[in-house]
Amino acid sequence: MPLHQLPVLIRRVAALLGVGLAAAATVLTAQQPRQQKQPTVLSQPCQDSLPVIYERISPAVVAIGAMSINPFDTDHRLDRVTGSGIIIDTTGLILTNSHVVFGRQVLTVTLDNGATVGARLVGADPLLDVALVRIPMPEHGTLRAAPLGDSDRLRVGAEVYAIGNPLGLDQTLTRGVVSATNRLLPGSGWSLTEPLIQTDAAINPGSSGGPLVDRCGEVVGITTAILSQAQSIGFAVPIRLARAAIPELVDHGHVVRPWLGVQGEFVMPMLKQLLRVPIADGFLVEAVEPGSPAEEQGLQGGSFELAIEGHPILLGGDVITAINGVRLDSPASLDRASDGWKVGSRLHLTVVRGTDQRMVDVTLAERPFLPGDLTGHRSATPTASPGTPAERPAPAFRL
């Protein structure tokens, strides 16, 4: 995917999640003679030392053990993973990664004091890779909850710290900087992309679900993945996205998303020049999800594959040229067309099949869990132990 399209995709993810992703800055202005504008003043960094920050946050960091049973695999019937989590509420609510706890039959949590208790899953979202689990209140004493910060204020170069349980080593702190913000992992399908925080703080298997902490001792991210073929390249889910998902995880057990049920890409000029055949400009449907609203209305996916500069495309499917009168010619136009989509929204699609054009009315359903949701990040290794192998890149957009 062209690099210049990445900011558009970031806005597109934000639109469907109801999350703003523009960074906030504190600007102090004052009335000056001749209307001169005061220069921007950045807030002073927090002054607490690293040991003080660690002592404040580490009591809220937990180790999570999870086990699932596969009755159809006699050689590897039990699958065990380990990860980390962060207590976000003194009633026992813990934030972690979906790939650590989702689909597991047994969950245990080991607290900072060494006590191990059973846990239950409250809700999970494999697309954002966030989940909530709950543990019972202790009979004696109280639980320590970590303060949540503002990931939108992070700047490249800011110092951050990761706390977790990598490779079974309890309560490990690593130090680094924010290497990039709004980072989209290459080779991920649209539904599996999210704007991540990239950091060079050491993250290893077992760190998944642990907090990424800023200089003020506040949680700004949840560590989630590493690039297995690289060094010092790790990723964390911005806490802003995780916080936005928490109410729905508590109320519904998952994040409610509208679903059309198509995968595909925009028709590229290079494709039209290469094939030298008339193809309508718009969203090229490569695949239609079984049981989706798109399948119910008869939309068709591609039937033969073509690779352009190593990028596979399925040709022969329908082309959606407009949605509710908004012409689809770029990711930005899709961003405009999808503004305000909800479960139950009625869409009017202009669809071209070959040389025929027709109008299709479709009602958006709630997106279910799909098989590809459980594979984790496709170009990175989720940092539960063991990791998930990388897979073939998915289509660029999934609606």
Image: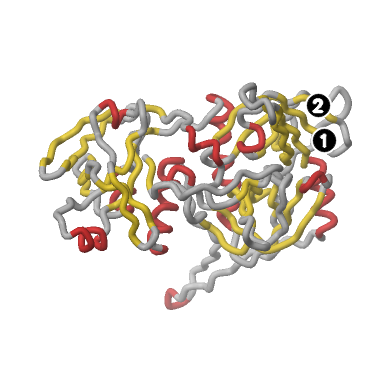
* Residue at 14 percent of width and 54 percent of height: 278
- Up the image or down, 348 lies above or below 316; here it is above
Q: Quadrant of residue 177?
A: bottom right
Q: Which residue does the numbered mark 2 point to in the structure image?
A: 117
**Residue located farthest toward the bottom when viewing the structure as drawn:** 34
User: Are the two marked residues, 1 and 2, in contact with CB atoms closer than 8 angstroms?
Assistant: yes
In the depicted view, which residue is nearer to us: 106 or 332?
Answer: 106
Q: How busy is the neighbourhood of tag 2: few (under 14 within 10 Å), some, or many (20 plus)?
A: some
Q: Quadrant of residue 90?
A: top right
Say what secondary structure mark 2 lies in. strand
Q: How busy is the neighbourhood of tag 1: few (under 14 within 10 Å), some, or many (20 plus)?
A: some
**Residue located farthest toward the front when viewing the structure as drawn:** 75
* Residue at 48 percent of width and 44 percent of height: 192
- Mark 1 or mark 2, which has the lower sequence index? 1
Tell me where residue 275 appears, x and y as whole percent: 20, 58
Q: Which residue does the numbered mark 1 point to in the structure image?
A: 111
Q: Amino acid at mark 2?
A: Val
Q: Amino acid at mark 1?
A: Leu
In the depicted view, which residue is nearer to us: 13 or 168?
Answer: 168
Q: Quadrant of residue 94?
A: top right
Is the N terminus in the top left, top right, bottom left or bottom right quadrant?
Answer: bottom left
- Up the image or down, 81 lies above or below 140; here it is below
Tell me where residue 209 appears, x and y as whole percent: 68, 42
- Up the image or down, 216 lies above or below 290; here it is below
Tell me where residue 196 appears, x and y as whole percent: 55, 53
Is the C terminus in the top left, top right, bottom left or bottom right quadrant?
Answer: top left
